[in-house]
Amino acid sequence: MQFGSMTITEKILAKASGQSFVQAGQNIWVDANILMTHDVCGPGTIAIFKKKFGQDARVFHKDKVVIIPDHYIYTEDKYARRNLKIIRDFAEEQDLTYFYGAFTDKYKGVCHIALAQEGHNIPGTVLFGTDSHTCTSGAFGMFATGIGNTDAAFVMGTGKLWVKVPETMKFIFNGTFPKHIMAKDIILEIIGDYTVAGATYRTMEFAGQAIKELSMEERMTVCNMAIEGGAKNGLIEADEVTESYLKDRVKKDVNYDFFRADDDANYHTLREYDASSMRSVVAKPHSPDNKGYADEMQDVEVDRAYIGSCTGGKITDLKAAAVILEDKKVAIDTFVVPATREVESDMDKVKVNGKTLREIFIKAGCAMTDPSCAACLGGPKDTFARTQGLERVISTTNRNFPGRMGSKKASIYLASPYTVAASALVGRVTDPKEYV
Amino acid sequence: MDSIIEGKVYVLGDNIDTDQIIPAEHLVYDCNDDQERKMYGKYALSSVPEGQQGLPDGQIPFVSEGSYVSDFQIIVGGDNFGCGSSREHAPFALREAGVKAIIAKSYARIFFRNSVDGGFYPPFDSKEDLLSFFETGDQARIDMKKSVVENITQGKVCSFNPLGEIIEILESGDLFSYARKKGLIK
């Protein structure tokens, strides 16, 4: 490596810290382009912000603190309701430009997807969010990472935070993915190989021809689960696919940088995968790195299917599920939760063989509800599709820790929307290969 | 921050995630309300599977039924402690339950950072595998200056890694006090 050579992550952080060169291992202070928070961590962040900067303190920039309630929306839990009011009052008091309040026509749904859809993801910039899956936005060639309430309160007041520049692990997928392979299979394959701590403190960067052929939504799913490998951030180089997604979503006066790595940049790991030989992956209970393959698990019975969340509730995900469920009936309880209002409205526009996704899901016997995080992380007892007992769930979500979807006695299997939909038809883990 | 920390040890395994530390349904209580914040102590580590609760034997709840504070003050963990969510409620819950220190083999990044920047307790990491060095219920004494932990019950001593530069943040109190001391904020 030559002095001056940088990875994409190093280039983004160098720019955000006002330096021409930074290197993995350095502790630096960076400027945040956006701080995102939601209803679960917002109230705590706001309390620390007021305690530390004063009751009359103002946020560092009213366009740059984005609040997106999404976790506990459709619940009667009195504390959850109170928390929605705390963030609403704060947004009003601070005159925040981007507050997507629950039960208003501005409500969106799952924050990571709303950030993308509302044009807050800007390539080359830094995004901090009080949610570990903030790394989703790395799909836009930006540095995005999850932080706690104390750090978020600090950013809220100053627009700055210290970060240690991470080393990069680069995963290169050569060739083309088979038709039945989705983003979830890609990231579960890697996490299975490297474990849930294999990328701790590092960047997981995804590259190669097969990754370049992925849509933005699929790229977001891959980057979303970088945290499940322990990574600080996930990253995919911005390109023409990114550009075309941003075109109608980002304001005209916003500048962005499409950083490229230097040829002789230094990597912690370079690992190549053959995209064409990929199989449908299922993460078995109770860890995302507990890798199995759908074609070897066909005797595993499941009694619930869940299609939703930031990794499984986008329109690409729901369309994939609909391709398999069209004109068929599910054999087990199947729940569909669109990630955002935009996805929900697209369910009435996007069609498979002339039928809208909503029509297909209704006819197949799925239960549906409004967009939010819903049962992905359990939540209050009355949350839609939350596990209450010994359920065996196959789910498009991103975590299967004990108790994650509510009941600690439940078993969660993570898989792609294709695999979850195929399994819903059979009541056992099912390889979607024959269905698509 | 005291350089000597003494207490009863609670032993956990690898990959203790934040859903096990504080299940999501409890993330709703106000951390600044004296009554509500106690709930975080009550439910700390409440989703750890029974067999993993207090190793080597398990079946020892971290906080006993009806209580808000744990009998254990020092947590000994394996690899990747605190993986999962960015919820700062996790280190907050542990501190509300009375935790004064954690010694784990390694940590998940956000949990480690939250423990330090929020000034909750020092998260030490050990070179050695402490899971075979301690049993739940042992009395331990941590000497931060010497970077050693003594198992008083079993009469043996083991070293851990010095905290390094983050000690400045913990000694200041939290990230804010540290930044003020350094002149980074007013």
Image (cartoon, rainbow, N blue to C red):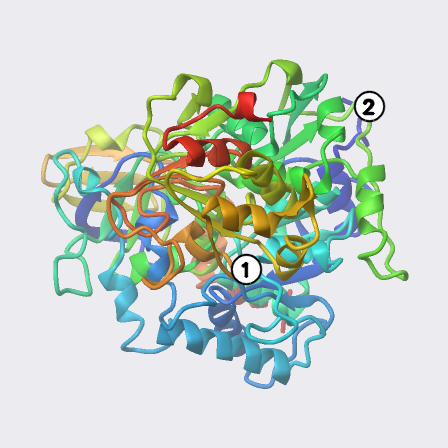
Chain to which mark 2 belongs: A
Tell me whether marks 1 and 2 sit on the same chain.
yes
Residue B68 place in picture, x, y as percent: 19, 65
Quadrant for residue A80, please give it: bottom left
Residue B116 place in picture, x, y as percent: 45, 54
Q: Earlier in the sequence, mark 1 or mark 2?
A: 2
Residue at point 40% right, 58% down? A384
What is the quadrant of the N terminus of chain A in the image?
Answer: top right
| Marking on residue A371 | 1
Residue A432 place in picture, x, y as percent: 52, 26
Q: Which residue is mark 2?
A: A263
**Mark 1 belongs to which amino acid?**
Pro
The answer to whether A185 is drawn above or below residue B53 in the figure is: above
Residue at point 32% right, 50% down? A387
Near-viewer residue (B70 or A257): A257
Q: The residue tagged with tag 1: helix, strand or loop?
A: loop
